[in-house]
Amino acid sequence: MAAVTETIETIDRLTDGGYKFGFETNIEMDFAPKGLNEDIVRLISAKKGEPEWLLEWRLKSYRAWLTMVEPNWARIRHPRIDYQDLYYYAAPKRAAPKSLADVDPELISMYDKLGIPLNERAALAGVAVDAVFDSVSVATTFRESLSKVGVIFCSISEAVREHPELIRKYLGSVVPAGDNYFSALNSAVFSDGSFVFIPRGVRCPMELSTYFRINARNTGQFERTLIIAEEGASVSYLEGCTAPMRDENQLHAAVVELVALDEASIKYSTVQNWYPGDAQGRGGIYNFVTKRGACRGRKSKISWTQVETGSAITWKYPSCILQGEGSSGEFYSVALTNNYQQADTGTKMIHLAPNTTSTIISKGISAGHSNNTYRGLVRIMPRAHGARNFTQCDSLLIGNQCGAHTVPYIESRNQSAKVEHEATTSKIADDQLFYCRSRGLSTEDAVGLLVNGFCRDVLKELPMEFAVEAQKLLAVSLEGSVG
Amino acid sequence: MLEIKGLTATIGDKKILRGINLIMPDGEIHAIMGPNGAGKSTLSYVLSGREGYTVTGGSATFNGQDILAIEPEARAAAGIFLAFQYPVELPGVGNANFIRTAVNAIRRARGVPELDAVAFLKEARAAIKSLKMPDDMLKRNVNVGFSGGEKKRNEILQMALLKPSLALLDETDSGLDIDALKIVADGVNALRGPAFSALVITHYQRLLDHIVPDRVHVLAAGQIVRSGGPELARELEAHGYAGLEAA
């Protein structure tokens, strides 16, 4: 209840409909030259002091990328991306901080502005944060208390140095370098990201969270996240994303890999609020992301929850490979597009083992001139006896200039499998708005309330404090969408 | 005081209200009766600001304020409440959340401090108890899966918590069994007082046995063609509307 009130207060506060994370931080940056070639890949690897095998892996990925073409099957349109006109490496000039005390105060104050406390004492109770600024992880909080229970939570660059055996074993094991155009690009040039390892039998004692921030101009952000939950381990992880407002488009191509062993569970939540571009569709982030989790162990579980309100383009399909017997995958998604935003998002649930289950709840909201597509695949392989899937895809249209599209692919190769699919499309009806207004709510309050109601099944999956944040975001993102 | 003078309104090209004149002092309850298509619901929608109706002439003021010139939410803040003939479903929106958001929107518009969740729930539970409604009324989604009677009772619950100074009840009695009718009437009677007035739109005398009006008006073909005391409702019940068409 409080959350909705806050939603309303937020609308009241923001009269100009602006993107409140759109400021730029002035920090001296270290850039690699523009463009992409083998030397840049070598330079990134060298900057990070990586072992030879990782450099080889990057180069192999780069060479694979050269032979590939950008996928064009998604329902998105954009001018050709000039991959030679981007910076692939940008880092704050100060040497890598060894502790919070070494972090540039400008950066600390930027994260304060974003509401992300890097100071442990001031941190949200029970949330450990890793902050990634452009290409580099700048601070990870609560590391010591986590390491006491054996949890590793650090930047991936650090993990390469300190836990090479884990990286070598798992990196690229869920999303192979050559999986797709953007994952190949990421594998070649990834700069940083988060690494999480939860050892056997440990329930991670706090929420883990990473905030990604693109700041530098003409810079691509290619972060790489790897989370491993050993037998019986569990973790809840959240990522948030923001960027300054810029007229040009910026590229973001991340890869996230999750591995869950026997009876392990990973809950991965995303609140994606990259700059969406302005009301005329100028600027904004191109978000081409590959996220995939492998339920390797029996009765393991991976749950994706995403609230996608930002980015000019969202191309993203967090998926689950259900390899372990009785394992389960979940995908809860809210994707909201306004103005000229385009989202093509959904999931893949690949049932390989017997008695695997998957649940897909997708809520798409389209406003303005935007286009919002759900694209999902449920595949039941021959060995997956007794597999079950339930899919629900709901679309909500606001106004009459936007589009909502649902593209479900269902492939069942096992007769004992049960697959259910439900889909609805609705509009916010005039009589619903009038009903709310006759009770004293402004049109914007009413839309916020109705949209939050529409998304409730997904929002309730988010960790409490982020659910509040997500509700605010939905309301703010819809500003100006109703006349 | 509600003061309607020469009010005319159309839907598209169709003239619905053809010059309504009505004065309703504070503290009074007036009933509007009349045949189907007379313009009863249109009158309540025009007064509460629903889109799709064009006011072509006349005026309507509440406590001296021109209500036709302001947005529906501003009319709510001015104290006007419409109990819908067909209450609208709001999927996913909890009833308690909805009513509290509305209560606080109105309080904010009036510059009164907002109610926190605890204070609101206390008031809401008390209202539910006095209206003899089930507790789960607050937990369910607004009107979703409600029976016809539950929807009407939910309108009365909202009225009880929003505490309007002018309530427009648009055929709130239609489709109600006798027990539900009593609950609705109790809800209205509980608000009766010098600062509360209500315009009760109904087809039937039955509701007026429980909410005894100060005045009864007959609306036919967009005009008020007769006005009288409570006895007029009984006369209409006995003889029907035949012969009451506007001259």
Image: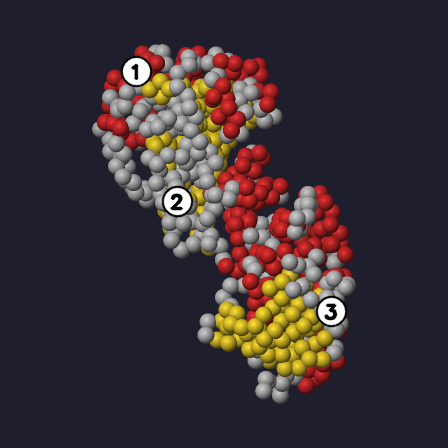
Q: Quadrant of residue B5?
A: bottom right
Q: Could you tell me which chain the residue with mark 3 belongs to?
A: B
Q: Amino acid at mark 1?
A: Leu
Identify the residue at image location x=30%, y=43%: A77
Q: Quarter of the image for the N terminus of chain A: give it.
A: top right
Determine if marks 2 and 3 fall on one subunit: no
The chosen color scheme is secondary structure
Question: Going by the image, does A369 lie left or right of A211?
Answer: left
Identify the residue at image location x=61%, y=26%: A125
Q: Secondary structure at mark 1?
A: helix
Label 3 crowding class (10 Å Cα cut-off): few <14, some 14-19, many 20+?
some
Q: Secondary structure at mark 3?
A: loop
Residue A21: % across, % down? 46, 33
Identify the residue at image location x=59%, y=66%: B47
Residue extending farthest to the left is A67
Distance from disc 1 to disc 3, alpha carbons, whole Å, reads 84 Å
Q: Earlier in the sequence, mark 2 or mark 1?
A: 1
Residue B118: % across, % down? 71, 43
**Label 3 sits on residue:** B28
From what the image shows, is residue B56 above or below residue A122?
Answer: below
Distance from disc 2 to disc 1, alpha carbons, whole Å, reads 38 Å
From what the image shows, is residue A175 above or below residue A38?
Answer: below
Number of marks present in the image shown: 3
Label 1 crowding class (10 Å Cα cut-off): few <14, some 14-19, many 20+?
some
Q: Could you tell me which chain the residue with mark 2 belongs to?
A: A
**Label 2 sits on residue:** A279
Q: Could you tell me which chain the residue with mark 1 belongs to?
A: A
**Label 1 sits on residue:** A43
Question: Going by the image, does B227 lie left or right of A32?
Answer: right
